[in-house]
Image (cartoon, helix red, strand yellow):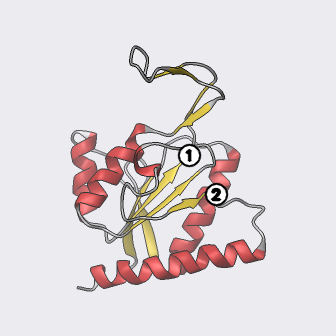
């Protein structure tokens, strides 16, 4: 039996994002783990947020994948406040579900791995928000050394997952 891991990611991915997602799934499989995801492996019968909690309670760890879902080309940050400022460059925004699901997983004290695309920020993707280090999203063109470093990250994390799972 594989160890269940809650994976937070958007439903729709572009080809580059899907390739990164597949790399994550390969690492899970390599360590005898399986993805559990609302709208993927599991479908809600009640309110989605409640289903996230139910599903997360049956998992031994969590992975948050911060993929861009919205690109804002122009806009104003903190409009109407003394700190108002125009955007100087486009910003990438992930699905809001990443932060909701990360909060639930953190509250359940599950070991977390957090990955994000380059321009993703705010919430769980800000350094120091949780005890999870924020990792760069893997990609298909990773050098061998980078792939080995990714496997090392999974090796350390899976030890915490197994400790919790077999407790």
Instruction: Return the residue nearer the eye: 48 or 87.
Output: 87
Residue drawn at (59%, 70%) of the image:
26
Q: Say which element carries label 2.
A: helix
Q: In which quadrant is the N terminus drawn?
A: bottom left
Tell me the number on the disc at residue 20.
2
Q: In which quadrant is the C terminus drawn?
A: bottom left
Check the image and report above or below for 9 versus 146. Answer: above
| Residue extending farthest front | 82
Q: Is residue 32 visible?
A: no
Q: Say which element carries label 1.
A: loop
Picture coordinates of residue 108 (x, y %)?
23, 63
Quarter of the rendering containing residue 90: top right
Residue drawn at (61%, 49%) of the image:
117
The residue at which mark 1 appears reads as 67
| Residue extending farthest top | 80
In the visual, does 80 lie left or right of 57? right
């Amino acid at each position: 039996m594989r160890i269940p891991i809650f994976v937070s990611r958007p439903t729709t991915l572009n080809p580059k994002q899907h390739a990164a997602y597949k790399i994550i799934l390969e690492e899970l499989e390599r360590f005898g783990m399986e993805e559990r995801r609302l709208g993927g492996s599991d479908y809600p019968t009640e309110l989605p947020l409640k289903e996230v909690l139910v599903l997360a309670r049956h998992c031994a760890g969590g992975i948050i994948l911060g993929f861009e879902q919205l690109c804002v080309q122009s806009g104003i940050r903190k409009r109407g406040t003394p700190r108002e400022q125009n955007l100087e460059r486009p910003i990438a925004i992930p699905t809001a579900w990443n932060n909701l699901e990360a909060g639930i997983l953190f509250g359940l004290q599950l070991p977390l791995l957090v990955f994000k695309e380059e321009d993703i920020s705010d919430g769980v993707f800000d350094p120091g928000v949780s005890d999870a280090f924020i990792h760069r999203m893997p990609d298909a063109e990773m050098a061998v050394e980078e792939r080995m470093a990714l496997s090392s990250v999974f090796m350390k994390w899976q030890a915490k997952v197994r400790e919790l799972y077999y407790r």
